[in-house]
Image (cartoon, rainbow, N blue to C red):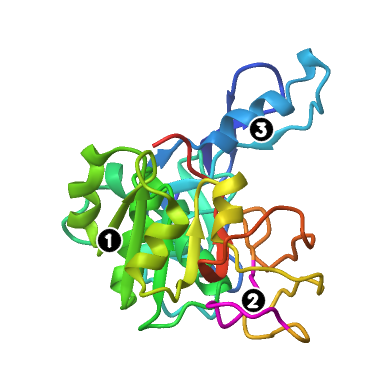
Amino acid sequence: MPETMTALFGGTGPEWTTRQVPVAQPGPGQIVVRARAVALNNADASMLADADPAQGCTGKEYQVGYEFAGEVTAVGGGVDTPAVGERVMGTTPGSFAQYVLSDHRNVLPVPDDLGYEEARALPTGLLTEHGALVVAGFQPGQSVLITGATSIIGLIGVQIARALDAKQIIATTRTAAKRDLLKQVGADTVVITEKQDLTQAVLNATGGEGVDVVLDHVGGQTFAACLPPRSTAPWSTSAASTPPNPPSTSTPCPTATCASPESPSASPSPPNSVPSAGIGRSGAHSGLSGPE
């Protein structure tokens, strides 16, 4: 590896600037990746604006970027995989550089039939959707409702749920034109929200039981409709717990967990803040998708 590299920095003005900086050496548990392609995220643009000193913002300089793809050039102590030379994709701060220092746990192998240009845009979506399902307590054989499913990240969620052996996947979209797409990627039932009532459609598809997990990409009243019915009992961050004297309902567990990319741990929501229709037992809000 060379001693120096080119990297992009923000915090000096309205545009990113290039700078020559030393190539980092990996410490224990770390790897260095020769970046061949990087991906732009919404957070990159907002961070640039928030740091622009010309606009009275922080003026704090930082190395730009999150998502990247390339081959491993060095590994630190205790790293068995990936090995030097392997193609990987990952996400870590400061990835808009020729060489990226990353924790080895933050990368995934790039499939042989996938180029760097495609691989670079996958890590955040894959980690977000898988992480949200984990936080919601998803288990193989459970049913999943995925809202906003024809957004890019929603499509990833459908495919991950299918790969993890979901028993039933219900996906929502606003228009019937996207029904076939959702079926192709793994949805069992497609709800057209412009024409169908979400609550009734999910209850019909599940024999009145509701789903085990909701993976929501819309928020607001859609997320409210996905939550189990509530009494005045406090909210719980555990999908396995049940408040005292729960109301009678077709949904057996009136609790919900909520997770977002900003905080991977479950966080409680305020009681009775929004009406709840009770079609899901646990839920995770990824909060990344835009309009379908």
Kindly state the secondary structure of the residue where label 3 is placed. Answer: helix
Give the percent coordinates (x, y) of residue 36. Answer: 35, 43
Q: If the image is split into quadrants, where does the C terminus sit?
A: top left
Front residue of 234 and 1: 234
Is 252 inside the magenta-drawn segment? Answer: yes
Which quarter of the picture shows residue 246?
Answer: bottom right
Task: Tell me if residue 17 can be seen.
Answer: yes
Kindly state the secondary structure of the residue where label 1 is placed. Answer: strand
Q: Is residue 196 left or right of residue 11?
A: left
The amino acid sitting under disc 2 is: Pro
Name the main secondary structure of what is drawn in magenta: loop
Which residue is denoted by mark 3 in the rendering? 47
Marker disc for residue 254: 2
Which residue is denoted by mark 1 in the rendering? 189
Residue pictured at 73% horizontal, 32% vertical: 61
Q: CA distance from mark 1 to mark 3?
A: 38 Å
In the image, the segment drawn in magenta is: 246-257
Q: CA distance from mark 2 to mark 1?
A: 24 Å
The amino acid sitting under disc 3 is: Met
